[in-house]
Amino acid sequence: MLSRKAGQRLMIGPNIEVTILEIQGNVVKLGCEAPASVPIHREEVSRRLPNPDHAENARRRPESPYFVECA
């Protein structure tokens, strides 16, 4: 278990960074930065995908690392 405050980050391996953008009550907004080859989905979206590692899903991401805000 990790405790983080708004504005703080955590690293997953050498190239995946998760930033706590905002906390309002029981809602936490996260920003995720990862290589384009790493798909990032909310759990409920990931469960609906036939295979989260499928090449078609990976192609939806840009070629370079990017920052995405997830609500």
Image (cartoon, rainbow, N blue to C red):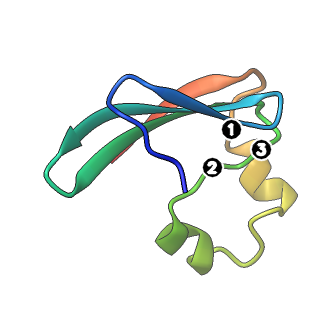
| Residues at marks 3 and 2, CA–CA distance in whole angstroms | 6 Å
Q: Compared with residue 24, is residue 66 higher up or lower down, i.e. above or below?
A: above
User: Would residue 51 be found to the left or right of residue 49 on screen?
Assistant: right
Task: Tell me the residue that label 3 is attached to.
Answer: 38
Amino acid on which the number 3 mark rests in the picture: Val
- Secondary structure under badge 2? loop
Residue receiving disc 2: 40
Please state if 56 lies on the left or on the right of 6 as rendered: right
The local secondary structure at tag 3 comes to loop
Q: Nearer the viewer, residue 53 or 7?
A: 7
> What percent of the width, then of the height, locates residue 54?
83, 63
Seen at 30% across and 47% down, the residue is 28
User: What is the number of the mark on residue 61?
Assistant: 1
- The image position of residue 11, as x and y in percent, is 68, 33
In the shown orientation, is residue 67 left or right of residue 16?
A: left
- Answer with mark 1 or mark 2, whichever residue precedes in sequence: 2
Which quarter of the image is occupied by the N terminus? bottom right
**Residue in the foreground of this view, choosing between 41 and 25:** 25
Q: Could you tell me how far apart the alpha carbons at marks 1 and 2 are, in whole angstroms? A: 9 Å
Query: Three-letter amino acid code at disc 1?
Result: Arg
Q: Are marks 1 and 2 in contact (CB under 8 Å)?
A: yes
What is the x, y in percent for residue 61?
A: 68, 38
User: Relative to the observer, which residue lies in front, 40 or 15?
Assistant: 15
Say which of marks 1 and 2 sits in front: 2
**Quarter location, residue 8:** top left
Whether 3 is drawn above or below 42: the answer is: above
Structural crowding at the residue carrying mark 2, measured as other residues with C-alpha within 10 Å and reported as few (<14), some (14–19) or many (≥20): some
